[in-house]
Image (cartoon, grey):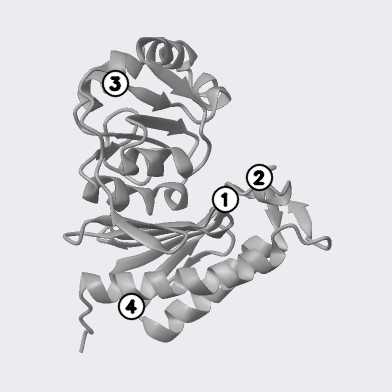
Amino acid sequence: MALTFTSADDLSLALSLAEAADRVSMDRFRAQDLEISTKPDRTPVTDADRAVEDIIRDAIRDARPRDQILGEERGHSGGTESGREWVIDPIDGTAGFLRGMPIWATMIALTINGIPQVGVISAPALGRRWWAAEGHGAWMSENGVERQLSVSKVASLSDASITYNSLPGWIGAGRGDQAVALATRAWRARAVGDFWGFMLVAEGSMDVCGEFDLQPYDIAALWPIVTEAGGRFTSVDGEQSLAAGSALATNGLLHDEVLSLVAPK
């Protein structure tokens, strides 16, 4: 007989997973004996990435043994519940983590039939955590103080603050000119990296965030937090897919204008 879990049940589990992950990641952050290697795709990985993913996987297997798991470091693990898959990025921002920068996070999502329903992003070195589940709103805690999230109401790009994350990523995708056009049309443009730019959109501090060269585990946890905060979340080409390879988050009011501006020439 299939087990039934509510979104509140799954969110509670995801938050407990983040707590466990934070203990592991903070123990290794700025450690003098941190082990660093290079993956086949030439991106760095540390012993902390693997340890965080392993502790999350073990806890999911205990609590949801039938669910599937996809993680950046350990790949895919099958389960009998084909429609339920946990998606894990153990340390988003590994390059900063290994240099001692505090802008990194553990990202945990649950997708149901391919659509992210629950997302938790925990950035313990910043003292921040963000979370959402479908129908439950989006929330954050900062140094233990919780508040509900809501995107901005900025309706004109000329009044907007945008972040393009990595300019080389836009250039590599053949959208360098579009990134420049977006940046020059906006009131302010900044490169806020990794997960943080998207969370600033959910908080209402930024209005637009876009990025290329992404995998499903880079995207899944962002999606429900932005949308539950009232924003829109698609690929840079307007698709709603974890496999699109890019992400665009806005306050919703600016989304169509930005999509038009960054479209391929």
Quadrant of the drawing holding the N terminus:
bottom left
- Which is more N-terminal, label 2 or label 1? 2
What residue is shown with label 2? 96
Q: Are marks 1 and 2 in contact (CB under 8 Å)?
A: yes
Which element type, helix, strand or loop, lies under badge 3? helix
Residue found 55% across the figure and 67% down from its top: 22
Regarding residue 39, the answer to whether it shows in the image is no
Q: Are marks 4 and 1 in contact (CB under 8 Å)?
A: no
What residue is shown with label 1? 104
Amino acid type assigned to the residue bearing label 4 in the image: Thr
View extreme (right): residue: 33
Q: Residues within 10 Å of mark 4 (few under 14, many from 20)?
A: few
Mark 4 or mark 2: which is in front? 2
View extreme (left): residue: 135
- Which is more N-terminal, label 2 or label 4? 4
What residue is shown with label 4? 80
- Which is more N-terminal, label 1 or label 4? 4
**Mark 4 and mark 3: Cα distance apart in space:** 40 Å
Amino acid type assigned to the residue bearing label 1 in the image: Trp
- Which is more N-terminal, label 3 or label 2? 2
Amino acid type assigned to the residue bearing label 2 in the image: Gly
Q: Are marks 2 and 3 in contact (CB under 8 Å)?
A: no
What residue is shown with label 3? 258
The image shows residue 261 at horizontal and vertical percentages of 31, 14
